[in-house]
Image (cartoon, rainbow, N blue to C red):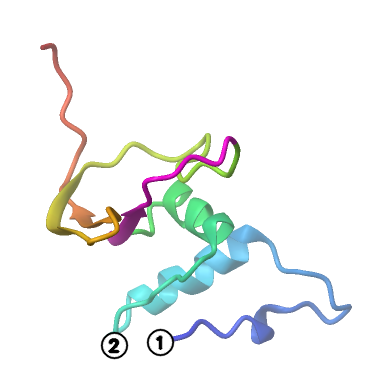
Amino acid sequence: MCLNLSPLMESNGSRPSKRRYCEKITKIKQQEGPDLHVYGSSNLLQTLLKHDLVDAFWLKIFPITLGRGKGLFADGTIPAAFKVTESTVTSKGVIIVNYERAGAVPTGSL
């Protein structure tokens, strides 16, 4: 399923607010249908994480350092527990992991 953002555009051509995106995605998630996927948009992913709209995600970890870049989990991301449901390491050393929601974040002491 692809979220069509054009109906969300304002009449003057301005971009809709993050709140409107989240409202639309919340309504879509409440309906029967295929899973929603986000590809290559860390800004949208961070917004979805902040609004508790992520049920699962694939994370690819490449064996390189660039010295800069965008963090996956930005300030304001709500605490959430995830469990590994699938993982693999490629011949080039890329780690690919699938995480799914696992309820509340466990707290306590070590």
The relative height of residue 37 versus residue 106 in the rendered view (above or below) is below
Question: Rounded to the nearest whole Å, what is the CA distance between mark 2 and mark 1?
Answer: 8 Å
Q: Residue at x 68, y 85 (%)?
A: 6
* Viewer-side residue, 46 vs 33: 46
Q: Nearer the viewer, residue 109 or 41?
A: 41
Give the position of the N terminus as an image quadrant: bottom left
Find residue 64 and report its horizontal and vertical position in percent.
44, 44
Percent of width and height locating residue 51 = 45, 52
Q: Residues within 10 Å of mark 2 (few under 14, many from 20)?
A: few
Q: Amino acid at mark 1?
A: Met
Q: Is residue 97 magenta?
A: no
| Residue in front for this viewpoint, 78 or 41 | 41
Whole-percent x, y for residue 78 in the image: 39, 39
Vertical side of 106 occupied by 35: above or below: below
Task: Report which residue position mark 1 lands on.
Answer: 1
Residue furthest to the top in view is 109
| Picture quadrant where residue 20 is located | bottom right
Instruction: Report the residue at 71% width, 68% height from top.
Output: 16
Q: Residues within 10 Å of mark 1 (few under 14, many from 20)?
A: few
Outermost residue, front side: 91
**Which of pointers 2 and 1 lies earlier in the amino acid sequence?**
1
> What quarter of the picture does the C terminus occupy?
top left
Q: Are marks 2 and 1 in contact (CB under 8 Å)?
A: yes
Secondary structure under the numbered disc 2 in the rendered image: loop
The circle on residue 21 is: none
Q: Is residue 55 above or below residue 103?
A: below
Q: In front of the other: label 2 or label 1?
A: 1
Residue 77 left/right relative to 95: right
Residue at mark 2 = 33
**Magenta-highlighted residues:** 55-67
Q: What kind of element bears circle 1?
A: loop
